[in-house]
Structures are given as structure tokens and as C-alpha cells.
Image: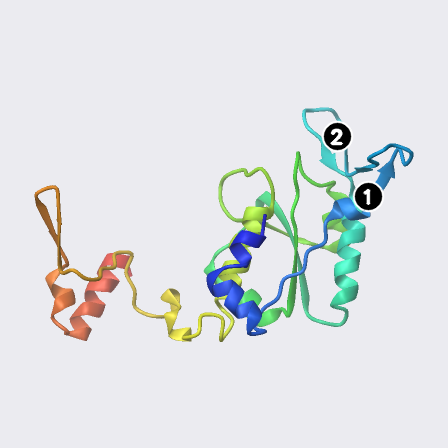
């Protein structure tokens, strides 16, 4: 699921340049094999939730083993462990900036089904993080969002560090050539202020558009 996003464009170039790196540890690979004599042995990764309810919960042991393996590879470094939860702290750019400065490595625990046994986050003192007020099928998309946002805070990832929109005067509305776009007998022009070359007034316009 990660290959198509992390293997393209800015993040792929940053990895090739040695600015960032990604490692994956599939909990299923650490799960107990169920019915070893079967033609295709099944690794038991989930079970029914205590207290009842629909769906299945990911068992703690395979996830714990996967995290332990990751920690052994990065022993002694400044590591953060993230546990995705709709009830967690809201992720934002300030968090991304802080994480990029504080930590050398971040472990993202990506759940599925009804989630992961809560004892995992207690054992590793993982921080609960939410990427928005909504529920997703799994933790893969939140992980990719955080990887992208945090990576771009690392010098060299964007090439030109001035490309960081949050570190310069920017607007939600951007334009390029042509100055006048014709579509279905209507003309859509670029705001005149952007064509003046008057940088102070242009910055004021951008600030107004961004609500600053």
C-alpha cells in the first residue's frame, strides 16, 4: 500500500539521497501459525473483542514483536512511537515541525479491523494521534500523511527549503500562465495585483487571501 506513494516524486528522491528512509514490519509475519499441517498455514493476527461487539481486534503479541524488532534496529536513537486513534491528539504542521527536530526515528503503528489491543500502546507508551475528525479503514493513510508532512520539514527533502509554504508568505489561490484563461465563452483572468511585480502589495494580497 505504501510503495506507490513513497516510491514516487519528492519522497522517493529524498530516500535515494539518504535524507529519509522507510522500513516496514508486518505483524502477520510475527503471528502464531494456525494449523501448521494445512496446505496453506494461516497466521492468526486477530480475535474476537472482549465485551462483545462486531468485528475483530488485532492481537497484541504479533504487534509487540514487530515493534520490538523495529526498536532493535534503531537502538539508542531518539525514537517516537505513534498509535493512530480517532480520539488522539490532532496532528498538524506544528507537530510535524517539532517531530522533525526532536526525533531520528518514528514508529507508526497501523491498525486494521476494529483496531489493535489497547495494551500495546500502554506497553510502549505510544502517543495517540489523529489526522482528522473521521474514521478510516486502517492506519496506512494516516501514516503516509504524517510521513509526508514530517519529511518535508527535513532540510534537503524539498530541494529548496524555501518551498515550505508554511514558512513563507503564501495563499490558497495560486496562478500561472496564461494571464487570461478562456473556457466556454467566459474569460478568467489572473488578479491584476499579481501581474504588477510590486512584491510588498503582492505579499499583502497573499496574506489577505490566507486569512493572516
Residue 8 left/right relative to 80 = left
| Image quarter of the C terminus | bottom left
Return the x and y of residue 15 as percentages of the image width and height: 57, 68
- Tell me if mark 2 has few (under 14), some (14-19) or many (20+) residues whose alpha carbon lies within 10 angstroms of its own: some
Q: Quadrant of residue 158?
A: bottom left
Return the x and y of residue 189 as percentages of the image width and height: 12, 55
Residues 75 and 34: in front is 34
Disc 1, SS: loop
Question: Does 31 sit above or below residue 96?
Answer: above
Residue at mark 2 to residue at mark 1: CA–CA distance:
17 Å
Question: Does 30 sit above or below residue 104?
Answer: above
Residue depicted at 51% across the width and 63% down the height: 11
Residue depicted at 25% across the width and 63% down the height: 207
Return the x and y of residue 122 as percentages of the image width and height: 75, 49
Q: Quadrant of residue 48?
A: top right
Return the x and y of residue 51 as percentages of the image width and height: 75, 26
- Tell me if mark 1 has few (under 14), some (14-19) or many (20+) residues whose alpha carbon lies within 10 angstroms of its own: many
Q: Which residue is mark 1?
A: 31
Residue 49's tag is: 2
Residue 48's tag is: none
Amino acid at each position: 500500500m505504501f510503495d506507490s506513494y513513497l516510491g514516487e516524486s519528492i519522497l522517493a528522491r529524498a530516500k535515494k539521497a539518504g535524507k529519509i528512509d522507510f522500513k516496514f514490519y508486518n505483524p502477520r509475519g510475527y503471528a502464531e501459525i494456525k494449523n501448521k499441517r494445512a496446505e496453506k498455514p494461516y497466521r492468526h493476527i486477530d480475535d474476537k473483542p472482549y465485551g462483545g461487539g462486531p468485528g475483530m481486534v488485532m492481537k497484541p503479541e504479533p504487534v509487540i514483536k514487530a515493534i520490538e524488532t523495529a526498536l532493535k534496529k534503531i537502538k539508542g536513537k531518539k525514537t517516537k512511537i505513534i498509535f493512530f486513534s480517532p480520539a488522539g491528539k490532532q496532528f498538524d504542521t506544528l507537530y510535524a515541525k517539532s517531530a522533525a527536530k526532536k526525533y531520528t526515528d518514528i514508529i507508526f503503528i497501523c491498525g486494521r479491523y476494529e483496531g489493535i489491543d489497547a495494551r500495546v500502546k500502554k506497553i510502549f507508551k505510544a502517543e495517540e494521534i489523529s489526522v482528522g475528525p473521521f474514521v478510516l479503514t486502517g492506519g496506512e493513510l494516516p501514516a503516509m500523511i504524517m510521513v509526508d508532512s514530517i519529511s518535508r520539514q527535513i532540510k534537503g527533502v524539498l530541494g529548496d527549503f524555501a518551498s515550505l509554504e508554511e514558512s513563507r508568505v503564501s495563499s490558497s489561490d495560486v496562478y500561472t500562465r496564461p494571464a487570461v484563461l478562456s473556457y466556454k465563452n467566459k474569460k478568467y483572468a489572473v488578479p491584476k495585483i499579481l501581474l504588477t511585480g510590486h512584491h510588498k502589495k503582492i505579499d499583502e494580497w497573499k496574506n489577505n487571501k490566507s486569512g493572516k
